[in-house]
Image (cartoon, rainbow, N blue to C red):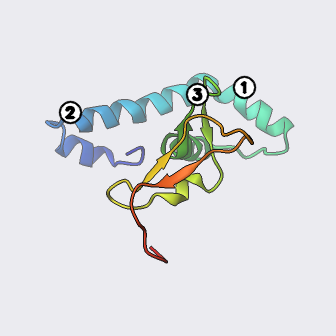
Amino acid sequence: PNYAHPDLLRNFSALPMANTMRYHIEHIEEVWKDNAEQWLSLADEAGAPHLTFRDFKWAVTLLQTRCFKVTWTDSTVLIPVGDLINTAAKTNLDWSTTLSENGSVMFTTSEDIGEGV
């Protein structure tokens, strides 16, 4: 949704989703404009002098589509490989929002999943 072409959003402007998508795209642009100077300076200090809006938009999209909401922190988290597990059109995976006794996250299939699926 963050990469929807403005013409496409205009063509579907009667749908609430198109307006929501436009709002999110504009918000990403505003956040970048408000913070770019500071972030570019920090990126330069960290050895990444060529940070762009495109990089920022990609990172925002990654976090929006790959994060998990959990109970052990007020933030959302990235769980390595966790975002790759459920790829079915219908959810076939349950996951725990709390950590197990050994500090891991538990993923459980909600139905039998064939090998290689």
- Asked which secondary structure carries label 2, the reply is helix
Q: Do the residues labelled 1 and 3 touch (CB within 8 Å)?
A: no
Kindly identify the amino acid type of the residue bearing the numbered disc 2: Pro
Q: Tell me which residue sits at (63%, 44%) in the image.
A: 105
- All told, the count of numbered labels is 3
Along the line of sight, which residue is nearer the eye, 9 or 79?
Answer: 79
Disc 3/disc 2 C-alpha distance (Å): 31 Å
**Which residue does the numbered mark 3 point to in the structure image?**
71
| Residues packed near mark 3 inside 10 Å, few (<14), some (14 to 19) or many (20 plus) | few
Which mark is drawn over residue 53? none
Residue 83 coordinates in the image, percent (x, y)? 54, 53
Q: Which residue lies furthest to the bottom in this view?
A: 116
Task: Please identify the quadrant where the C terminus is shown.
Answer: bottom left
**Which residue does the numbered mark 2 point to in the structure image?**
16
Tell us which disc is closer to us: 1 or 2: 2
Residue 73 coordinates in the image, percent (x, y)? 64, 26
13 left or right, relative to 111: left
**Quarter location, residue 81:** bottom right
Q: Residue furthest left?
A: 14
| Residues packed near mark 1 inside 10 Å, few (<14), some (14 to 19) or many (20 plus) | few
**Which residue does the numbered mark 1 point to in the structure image?**
38
